[in-house]
Amino acid sequence: MILEEALAVVTQALNHQRLTKVQNIIFRQAWEGKSYIEMGVAFGYDPAYLKDEGAKLWQLLSQACGTKVTKINFPTVLAQYAEAQQAQAQQAEANQAEANQAEAQQEQSILPEISTDSSRRIDWGEAINVSSFLGRETELATLKYWLLQNHCRLATILGMGGMGKTALSVKLAQQVQFRFERVIWRSLRDAPPLTELLTTLIQFLAPDPDSTLPVTETAQLAYLMDALRANRCLLILDNYEALFQAGQQTGTYRQGYEGYRELLQRIGQGQHQSSLVLTSREKPTVVAALQGENMPVRVLNLAGLPQADAARLLQAKGLSGSAAQVTSLVQSYQGNPLALMITATSIQDLCGGRIDTFLQQQTTVFNGVRNLLQQQINRLSELETKIMYWIAINREAVTVQELQADLAPFVPMSRLLEAVESLYWRSLIEKNDDGFTQQPVIMEYMTEQLIEGICQEILDTKTHSATEPHPFAFLKNYALLKATAKDYIRDSQARLILEPIAQQISIQFSPQELLERVNHLLSHIRQTNASNYAAGNLINLLAHLRIDLTGADFSRLKIWQADLSNLNLHHVNFTQADLSKSIFAETFGGILATAFSLDGTLLATSDSNGGIQVWQVGTGQRLVALTEGRAPWVWSVAFNPTQPNLLASCSDDTYIKLWNVETGKCLRVLSGHTSSVHMVAFSPNGQLLASGSEDGTIKLWQVSEPSAASCIATLEGHQGWVWSIAFSPDGQTLVSGSVDQTLKLWNVATGICEQTWIGHTDWIKSVAFSPDGKWIASGSTDRTIKLWQIETGQCLKTLQGHQDTVTAVAFSPASQQLVSSSYDQTIKLWQISSGECTRTIQGHSNRVWWVTFSPDGQSLASGGDDHAVRVWDIHTGRCSKTWKGHTNGILCLAAHTTQHLLASGHEDETIQLWDIQTGEILRTLRGHTHRVWSVAFAPQSLAQPLLASSSGDRTVKLWNWQTGQCLNTLRGHTSWVWTVTFSPDGKRLVSSSVDGLVKLWDTQTGKCIETLQEHKAAVVRTIFSPDERTLISGGFDQTIKIWDSATGTCLRTLEGHQGTVWSVLFWAQNQQLISGSFDQTIKFWDIKTGQCLRTLTGHQAAIVSLALSADRHYLASSSFDQTIKLWDLETGECVRTFAGHTGIVTSIIFFPTVDLQNQTDLALLSETDASELLISISYDETIKFWDTTTETCIHSMQTPRPYEGMTITRATGLTEAQRATLKALGASEADPHFH
């Protein structure tokens, strides 16, 4: 028994009589074994006095427990007393169960009991504990009769706040649960949008949860009705009134919540075998229209407790009085349970528990719970009132430590504990395992008061002069939105606090007027310079109203709990601002992998922009950022299980890196693979590291001494890329999954492949061993997950439900659950024993690359192409934390020379059209749902202004670049489309894809006219010859193929590169091909013979783009090494190296300056005599113009970053990591100009 449990036993033994302050001190200190002398020194009391008071306490407890209690034996006696009380309660429960069983047998003929097999499912959600439920026998009997005998489809428990509707609904569900196959209880207190609720319901009710589940509201409603027809389901929705608009006619829904009306209509009128129970303070109009004594829709108007039940409640609260006095008190409050509990607390506090004394004051006239709450709140101290508001703001149970962090100014813990204890005694707050919270009616009241107070303070601004002080009691003391709260809490705060304030304020002010009001308020706040939440609140309010903050001055303000993560804050001044507890966007790309440290305190993530971040899970702060540098995609990260600070990563640059996460230093770079490395995994003892690569091999590295790590074995056998690897729990076996559709089990000691398992029909993207060593799970591009029994090698279960590639699988620590992620943007939880999908988690807005369990099995961490890292609670499926990144690398480039246009394709799924003359973005083309990998202008001979683009969304799009209209979407590829190129006459289009196919399209009809399929892996580049008769393609199979474009026949295959062929060019005059490769070389080939004529070397990393100068004297190449090289074609020498990009240089083109000569105001031309400019783009988000004669960058363009021009000079409350992030996103510490 712990101290708090002992105090609860004392409270029960003393019939809810509380200990005095001194008795409380004695009890707590004696529990810790302190003497009276030690207590006196610590708390300033005379030890003799404490001894006398202690004797009285032990005597009091002796009488209550029925046995002698002393300072020495009181823990033992209380434990024995608690056991005895528990035994009595269990006996009473057994008696009640026996009675319930007898009752159930009588009702058997009405609605049969569902057997307690695996087909029954119950989800209690946030249902309250009703172990101390009193009375309501008549109401329960009525409701049970309606549900079990009348088969009511819709029953509503209607009553004012505090009547006990919630408790009654839970008690009802407990008593009838065995008559239904599905029971789900949900609170609508936080007003979830209908689609959010329906998603929860259909995931729970679905007979096959891993099947395709609808996402639109209409489809979800239809699915729900099918589920209610297929099974006997009981749905309980509590606090239905939260969906209604305050201040409007009864039953008027909030804007956007009208769909709930159709939900009730369908359930109330539809044919099905299920029941929905609502609790509400307002009657929904649908219920009013459908209800009737002989109808399947009924309403129970819940009145106050009967006299006898109410008397029992007062007795339990320790009040004393005659039967007549009790009756008078109960009648004064019409039997409202909450009102009686609150009043009973007041009687204890003010009248010594005597009802007669209270009644003599004649203050018991019942004007509703609202008036009663107002009276009670008005009697609270200032600190108690603040605590009440903060508990309402937090929306869920909160600890005293969290309350202390919320309160401003600082409150000592001793004062805080006293205030919290006082509120608890007053029945204004409740305690559960997670902390302190409020009953819904109290939370709603406090929220309404907060909203009213905030609105009044903003509206009152006009009545205060610039010099007159303003109290700002609400704005400064309370955060309307806690930026650092769990995601679902922050969403609730925005919906239930910020939104009502925004609605009221927007009625009174135009956006411009509101900005003026806010500036007026900020001038007052800036003068006081006190610690408060006012500035952060006003920024959150403006952001919620989507008011443009460009150029705003928030200097010298304390900006706490501001959510700045999704805002464009261009040229905003935060000079000398305190940005504590505010959150910002981060600088990372699509999240490819997540990994928890062994103790679960750290989370490492890797992304598509070459970054590795290590986060502190508890605080949400970034511990360190590790930069891969030349690698765009860091595919995998893994913590060493025995060296907590050791992290391994692998990436596209073929290297594996070992990092010290404490110092951020790279300890060792491991080389040996010849292509991208997709996965790293440590052995359980931390001595070995395994890596799997696109080169088809697995390597084992000895890493016991990281700085001296070396390769000790190379495992060969796969016939394609190795996507995933995992060690067995004993470290003796390694499993690998490959593009060749096989799993292989390797003996780690010998390096021999001992088994090969076949079953998947497409790439195997992920493998995992179960911690108990019994299972291997594999996830595949074929959309399935397979569970393999290690002992037999048999696939015992195939889990189906994902609608696209399964990217990751992971077992829970207890080996009872499996989690999976997918391109379909979902995460699924599966029960291993049954193979059933138990939960589908939605929240990512793009493909999910990775998901993993936390070491304690309570959370999941996922990463997606929406640039988000999310942490999920596995029990509720709710997202508790999100880190949101922002990068917008430029991936492809095309030029229209006569129109002086550039088209660039971006990581954010858009295409930008740039005016070279002004550097401005003329138009943004939106339509792709993945990165844009290639863009191409149609030849100018074509009458139409066409632009083609290809994307990771597997499509090719044709655009009218003048209007921005998408004219056609070409579908046929089954994976990312890397490149798209027009034929010289513009009538045909060629595309190449990760699916290994090259496709020819008719640009007028959009039809695919030919599919070429000789490549054995992804095809990266395809181009037409100048005479259109030939196609050239290069790809991941390290070959170049020459095709007859008319027949689709492969004429010749050129071999010689030792890595992916990223770029190919025709050098028509010399009848040669030029290719650039992952192997860091450029090769020249004779088209007729296929012979490699020469090889150029010089780049330090993969070569990704090539371009020929117009005079064909020079070749330009760009690379992962962030440089551009200019080669003399005659000599093969590198004559210039252009350095300046800070990311991979993804594409280069030559642009003739002669086409720009008439643009006299183009300043960059005055700085060069070159006949051509070299234009480059990069993952660093810039477009650079280079003078080819001097290696000088003469111009640079960039899409605006979120914090472009933002000033953070001498701003406080930022970590060094946050400061660096803000600068990377456009902020600076330059001194602003004050006016």
Image (spheres, grey):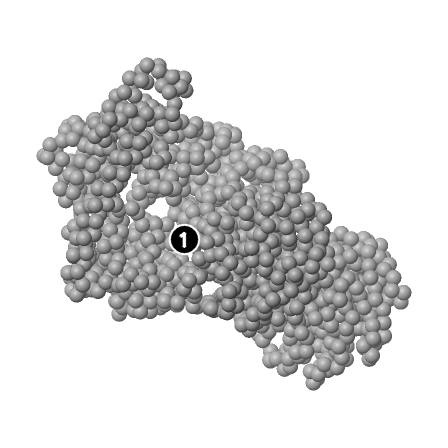
**Residue 1204 seen in render:** no
The image shows residue 642 at horizontal and vertical percentages of 59, 46
Q: Is residue 1039 left or right of residue 954?
A: right
Q: Nearer the viewer, residue 657 or 684?
A: 684
Residue at the image point whose x is 65% and y is 66% from the top? 721
Q: Nearer the viewer, residue 469 or 96?
A: 96
**Residue 324 seen in render:** yes
Height in image: 1157 above or below 37? below
Q: Nearer the viewer, residue 111 or 670?
A: 670
The image shows residue 668 at horizontal and vertical percentages of 71, 49
Res 1119 quadrant in image: bottom right
Q: Is residue 913 left or right of residue 532?
A: right
How crowded is the residue under tag 1: few (<14 C-alpha within 10 Å), some, or many (20+)? few
Q: Nearer the viewer, residue 700 or 1166?
A: 700
Res 698 quadrant in image: bottom right
Residue with the mark numbered 1: 876
The image shows residue 645 at horizontal and vertical percentages of 61, 44
Inspect the image, locate mark 1, and give the three-letter code of the amino acid beneath it.
Answer: Thr
Residue at the image point whose x is 14% and y is 44% from the top? 306
The image shows residue 956 at horizontal and vertical percentages of 61, 71
Res 974 quadrant in image: bottom right
Residue at the image point whose x is 60% and y is 66% from the top? 754
